Image: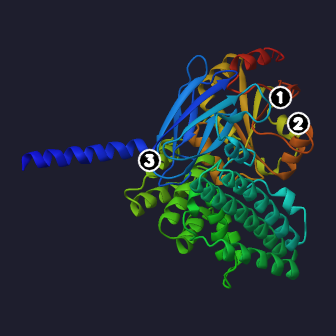
Amino acid sequence: MKVNRIVLVLLILTYLSCNAKKSEIIIIGKIIGDIPEKVEYTTPINGTWFYGSKQSAKPDSLGNFKITININSPSFITLYIPNKASGTLLIEPKKIYNINFNLTLKDKKFIVTGKRNKAQNIYNSFPNPDFNIFDLNKFLKDSVTSVIASKIKTNKEKEILMFQELLDEKEISEDFFALIKLDRECYYAAITGKVAFIKFMDSYRNNNEELKNSSLELWNTVFNTMPIITPMLNSSPWFYSLAENYVNYKEYTDPTFNFAELTEIYKQGLIHAHQISESNKYLKDTRLEYFNASYLYYHCWQNKDNSKELITHYYNFKEDYPSSNYTKHLTSIVTPIIEFHKKVEEASSSNKIKFIDNYENIDSFDELTKTLRGKKIYIDIWGTWCGPCKKEFQYIDDLKKLLNSKKAEVLYICEGRNSKEKVWKEMIKGYNLEGYHIMANEKLLADIIKIFGNNNSIYYPHYILIDVDGIVINKSAAKPSELIKLERQLNNFKIN
């Protein structure tokens, strides 16, 4: 009896071992050009492409790296060399993939090499997976929705035909083709839905009943031909974009929808609560779990306003899905927002944080600098929604030391066009931005853009140096992260 049990255990272990090997895929990579510290790659969660589920591999001194992933079904993964290049693979169990990242090239830096690589490289000639659909302009320029629908249909069929031909030539498997076909249908359904949404909103703004009816007809077509419950649909990296559009479709076409009420929700800063509430109405099961996880990750990743709402929804997600495989990825990205609000609550008032008197009524840059005559000023133009602006705040302590040594002070100009006053003041406390502060009104911002911008726009963050007489020493000064360069620029200041 005991021997039989041992044999049974060995058989089970052998079975599990064999199945583990069956699900393994290997990626052998080569980097040409400057060797980065790491190559990042997404790993599928329940068969879905999720931007937050990233791991990394370290290249050797020659740029070689190897990645091993265990999967049970065909899935999409994306590989990244941060800030330089990316590429996507449709991987299948038991396969080996060879790829090159050629960083010396301007375009097409990601190439799949080896046998039967044509389908992978065709896929990488399309837009890489993202949270949003950006490839819209070529369709939006047409005003007639039927013409737009026809062009989208033609593009979709042309792309699917490419893979159908490869299937006929036995270059790809049936499983590969089934997933790539579903992905292209999802992608173009998301594009069609987004175009319909934009046209629908245009009809609202312009009170155009004809446009409203035609865009609504186009929108209806999307979810009649591609129901959100289509099996395996959330295996496509573009499912989030389609699901987001579906939630908008259900909300905006509801007879009780009130645009004024939605506008008020935006003004009150409760949009995350509203969006998640709407998604809970219209999505179900694994699709809802994936959508809410992606929504939370995306908005925490963007981190436009350190919204407390996101913290609430993170805890709600953990409660709703106690064993979710997405949670650990959400935890890592929501933690900085939790820590930010902890700092805001613990921060005491500082007399080194000074708001410009009557700042609401200052309408020009000259008027602003007159209030600070006699001081050397390092100006930081930023926005509460601007990720790169906030990234520079991590160098705040070194910046303070440098400015103190040069007897200079800092003026933070927050653009008031897209920044909320409550969030602005929270961030000043949370990041401990000692110095002078002003939220620029529309006239002041326009004047700043006219003087320091280009083609009626300005990039954020933007830094300027002015001397004790209010004269601009440098219209595009170095960032806090470029401290040595900034020190050289500060040495050009006029002495008091």
Give how far across and how far down residue 190 sits, in percent.
Answer: 70, 63
Question: Is 46 positioned to the left or the right of 459 in the image?
Answer: left
Residue wearing tag 1: 476
Q: Position of residue 75 (x, y in %)?
A: 55, 51
* Residue ID for mark 3: 328
Secondary structure found at label 2: helix
Few, some or many C-alpha atoms within 10 Å of disc 2 (few <14, some 14-19, many ≥20)? Answer: some
User: What residue is shown at x 70% (from left), y 54% (from top)?
Assistant: 163
Most foreground residue, 73 or 381:
73
The crowding category of the residue bearing disc 3, from other C-alpha atoms within 10 Å (few below 14, some 14 to 19, many at least 20), is few
Q: Which of the two residues, 52 or 23, is positioned nearer the viewer here?
A: 23
Q: Is residue 425 left or right of residue 141?
A: left
| Pointer 2 residue | 452
Residue 20 in the figure: left or right of residue 153 = left
Select label 2 or label 3 by which is in front.
3
Residue 331 disc label: none
List x then y, in percent, for residue 62. 60, 17
Q: Relative to 201, say whether 255 is above or below.
A: below
Residue type marked 2: Phe
Q: Amino acid at mark 1?
A: Ser
* Residue displayed at 90% across by 69% down: 143
Residue 98, image x and y in percent?
60, 33
- Callout 3, which amino acid? Lys
| Disc 3 from disc 1: Cα separation | 41 Å
